[in-house]
Structure formats: structure tokens, C-alpha cells
């Protein structure tokens, strides 16, 4: 089982922890980090000193470092000979609480998972701000821009004037539609009801003979004025 995520403490031992009692504290039966099949248990049952561990072969626990009264480090190791041992695990006791020290593989694995989680969260957040439209393409849309737009006073957008091509083209289309579909109702004055085109009275056109007589009179008057000539000039007296 993975013991890196648990800890163990016995508050009754905390006031008396020192270099001589820390291994007895670690060998408590309720401690999940202690292996009861170790050589320390054999020495304890036979009432021998810890110096006899060097003459035995198997798993044993030793006090590796001590900084009374706050810090103690205990090592679990496999003894193969009086001069050859292989470390298996380290445990540190801080203020009476026992923790298992993580191995190098666990540390690297934890750091890699933390980094990957951070990168994945960053990509997910970045994708939430990404927008796409077939006519515009890709662009970024951040939440702070929405807040700025809400706080900014709304300015009236100026209507862009139409171009000459647009105006001429529209006029030509309207003229064409008017010729194809002439209006049936006409509003002669603003505020009045529209009147059908058939009911509008057309003004009588002038008689062509009267027009001709008027033209003749104007021609005669012009001829008589030309026959008389300009008025005579009088001599000025000096």
C-alpha cells in the first residue's frame, strides 16, 4: 500500500521523545510504518542491545539523524552483511508526527502531474476565449473586454453616406419599378388621405389657336418697335 498520504502520532510519547526513546516510539504496534518482522523486534524480544543488529541479516530500523526535540529521521534498510546495507525507505518525525519520505520517482511523478495539470488548465481556459466565424476567422474574446464595454458610455455610431454608384443604381431601380408598377393612389398634400389616380382632375390644356394668336401679337409688337428705331440724341449745351 502507498503510505505517502498518511501520518501517525501518539500524543502520550511527545513529551518524552529523545534519541534513546524514538525507536521505541516508532516500534509501537499501532504505527502503520513499522514492520513487525524486522530484526529490531527480534532484538527487543531477546532483550539485547541495538549493537547486535550489525551481526544479523534482514530488515532493520536505525536512527539516521536527530535534532531534539523537534526532528528525528529513521531509516529502514536491508542488511546483507556487517558492512553492507541497502536503504529501503526513510521516515521523519516532526513534533511527534511520523511521515514517510517520498522516493525520487514519486517526487518526479508528482511534479510532472502538477505541471501537466497546470498546462491543461491553461489550454482549457485559452480555448474558452477563442472564437471562430467563417467570414472573420479566429479571434480572442476576453471577459474583461465585456466588462469594459459595459462600463464605457455608448457612443452613437455615425451612419456612413452612400456612394454615388449606390445612389444612382438605386434611383435607376426605383424608376424601373415605377414604370413597371405605376402607383394607384396619390397623396396630393401631406396629412390627406391618398386618392386614386383615376379620380384626380386634370387641368385643361390651352387651345392651340389661342396660343398662336398670342405668338402673332408678340411678333407684331417687336416689328413696330424695330421700325421706329432708337430715340434721337439731343445735343448737350456747354
Image (cartoon, grey):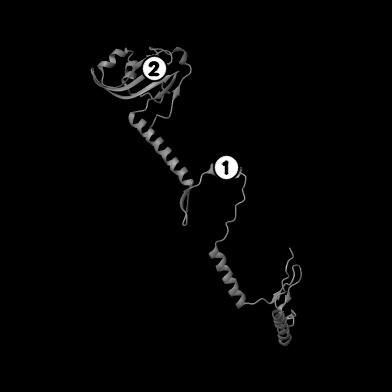
- Residue 93 visible in this rendered orientation of the protein: yes
x and y percent of residue 24 in the render?
A: 39, 16
Which residue is nearer to you in this view: 148 or 28? 148
Looking at the rendered image, the quarter that the N terminus falls into is top left
Residue 148: assigned label: 1
Classify 177 as above or below 238: below
Q: Which residue is mark 2?
A: 72
Taking the view exactly as shown, the residue that stands out farthest to the bottom is: 209
Could you tell me how far apart the alpha carbons at marks 2 and 1 are, in whole angstroms? Answer: 57 Å
Residue 164 in percent (x, y) is at 55, 63
From this view, report whether residue 211 is shown above or below residue 90.
below
Q: Earlier in the sequence, mark 2 or mark 1?
A: 2
**Other-residue count near label 2 (Cα within 10 Å), few / some / many at <14 / 14–19 / ≥20:** many
Outermost residue toward the front?
238
Mark 1 residue element: helix
Please tell me whether mark 2 or mark 1 is closer to you in this view. 1
> Residue at image x 58%, y 69%?
171
Amino acid at each position: 500500500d502507498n503510505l505517502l498520504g498518511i501520518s501517525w502520532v501518539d500524543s502520550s510519547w511527545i513529551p518524552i521523545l529523545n534519541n534513546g526513546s524514538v525507536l521505541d516510539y516508532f516500534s509501537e504496534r499501532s504505527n502503520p510504518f513499522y514492520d513487525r518482522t524486522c530484526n529490531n523486534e527480534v532484538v527487543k524480544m531477546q532483550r539485547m542491545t541495538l549493537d547486535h543488529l550489525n551481526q544479523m541479516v534482514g530488515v532493520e530500523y536505525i536512527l539516521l539523524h536527530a535534532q531534539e526535540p523537534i526532528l528525528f529521521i529513521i531509516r529502514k534498510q536491508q542488511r546483507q552483511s556487517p558492512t553492507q546495507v541497502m536503504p529501503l525507505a526513510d521516515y521523519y518525525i516532526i513534533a511527534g508526527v511520523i511521515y514517510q519520505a517520498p522516493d525520487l520517482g514519486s517526487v518526479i511523478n508528482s511534479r510532472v502531474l502538477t505541471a501537466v495539470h497546470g498546462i491543461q488548465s491553461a489550454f482549457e481556459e485559452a480555448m474558452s476565449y477563442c472564437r471562430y466565424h467563417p467570414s472573420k476567422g479566429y479571434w480572442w474574446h476576453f471577459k474583461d473586454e465585456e466588462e469594459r464595454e459595459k462600463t464605457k458610455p455608448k457612443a452613437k455610431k455615425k451612419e456612413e453616406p452612400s456612394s454615388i454608384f449606390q445612389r444612382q443604381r438605386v434611383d435607376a431601380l426605383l424608376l424601373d419599378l415605377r414604370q413597371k408598377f405605376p402607383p394607384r393612389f396619390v397623396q396630393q398634400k401631406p396629412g390627406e388621405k391618398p386618392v386614386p389616380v383615376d379620380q384626380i382632375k386634370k387641368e385643361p390644356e390651352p387651345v392651340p389657336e389661342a396660343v398662336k394668336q398670342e405668338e402673332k401679337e408678340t411678333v407684331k409688337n417687336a416689328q413696330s418697335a424695330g421700325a421706329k428705331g432708337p430715340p434721337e440724341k439731343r445735343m448737350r449745351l456747354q
